[in-house]
Amino acid sequence: MRVYRWDLDKTYLETDFHSLSGLVRSATEPAHAKRAAPGAAPLLRALAADPLARISIVSGSPEQLRPRLEEKLRLDGVRWDSLVLKDSLGHLKKGQLRAVRGQLGYKLPALLQARAGLGRGTREVLFGDDAEVDALVYSLYADVLAGRVRPRELSRILDAGGVYPEHRDAAAAAAAALGTADAVDRIFIRLEQGRPPADFAVFGPRVVPVFSWWQAAVVLFAEGAVGARAVGAVAEDCAARGGLDTFAFGGLLQDIVRRGAVDPAALGPLELPEAVRAAMGRAPPGGAAPPGAPLPDYVGLAQGWAAGAAPRRDAG
């Protein structure tokens, strides 16, 4: 079995939470007015089409938005198995203001708790964005599952990130209850904020920043997770709603090959316009981190995120 874990805001939905008007609009607009990111809906539908796959959504959106978010997913024809939303009102009642906006102390415990009961053979692929802390949370989650970060060290990292003690303890307890499994295959981060992919190199080659969900579809095709029809459906959506043309697709393919996220030889069966395939052929080979590479400096990264900093290639 494979579990696909998705975020919603900025990952699946085009949400503006950086302005007051955007927050108000997100909270009040009907489901049919919410816009999925180009390529997100067909990609998620393709992943959910596998009867052995499970779709798990963990979002920082408040619980009060559940009816509208579920309606939006149904309108998009998306099947999901679980949808976890944040109890923002509960945090406010406790005076936990950092927890209302912060995601480290919310998403990590939620992911670890959701892993309970899954066998060692269950693989995972995670989808997030660069607007919040997804790369850090997902990478840390993967290393906790693999036993590379133990519960005591995890507590130290969460303390560095300014996580409230009850959320820190919940994460550590959930981690201690799990067996070890190097279960996370890929972490896709949508570059919604325009950050350069090199900023995420600190997390290693498992984290794949993408400028478009079509790039993620191509990587997943090369790894046998989706078929050529799914890649085409994602491309059509990105062209129709994202404004991508043949040259843009060629540049995206060249980029993802150059960064070493996909083996060009695995794309042979994929029907690509000649201009796109020519761009792929000109791409130099990418590199990957050597086996046994050191862990990211999670304490330093957590401190940086708590202070409002983004990950940088020289961090750790």
Image (cartoon, helix red, strand yellow):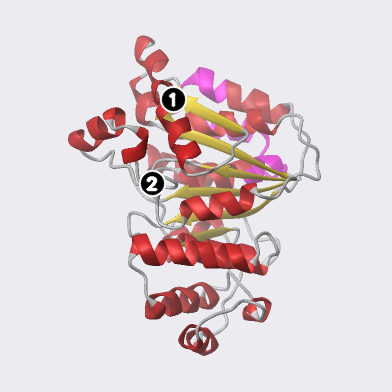
Camera-side residue: 42 or 125? 42
User: At which x and y percent is residue 56?
Assistant: 60, 37
- In the rendered view, would you say 54 is above or below 102? below
Q: Is residue 291 left or right of residue 26?
A: right
Is residue 167 shown in magenta?
A: yes
Name the residue beneath numbered marker 1: 67
x 60%, y 58%: residue: 206
User: At which x and y percent is residue 298?
Assistant: 52, 45
Q: Residue furthest top?
A: 93
Q: Quadrant of residue 38?
A: bottom left
Binning the other alpha carbons within 10 Å of mark 1 as few (below 14), some (14 to 19) or many (20 upward) gives few
Binning the other alpha carbons within 10 Å of mark 2 as few (below 14), some (14 to 19) or many (20 upward) gives many
Q: Which mark is residue 10?
A: 2
- Secondary structure of the residue carrying numbered label 2: loop
Is residue 145 shown in magenta?
A: yes
| Amino acid at dot 1 | Pro
Is residue 196 visible in the rendered image? The answer is no
Q: Which residues are magenta?
A: 142-169
User: At which x and y percent is residue 159?
Assistant: 49, 29
Q: Is residue 293 left or right of residue 102?
A: right
x 33%, y 60%: residue: 194
Q: Are marks 2 and 1 in contact (CB under 8 Å)?
A: no
Camera-side residue: 269 or 240? 240
- In the rendered view, would you say 73 is above or below 159? below
Q: Is residue 234 left or right of residue 61?
A: right
- Secondary structure of the residue carrying numbered label 1: helix
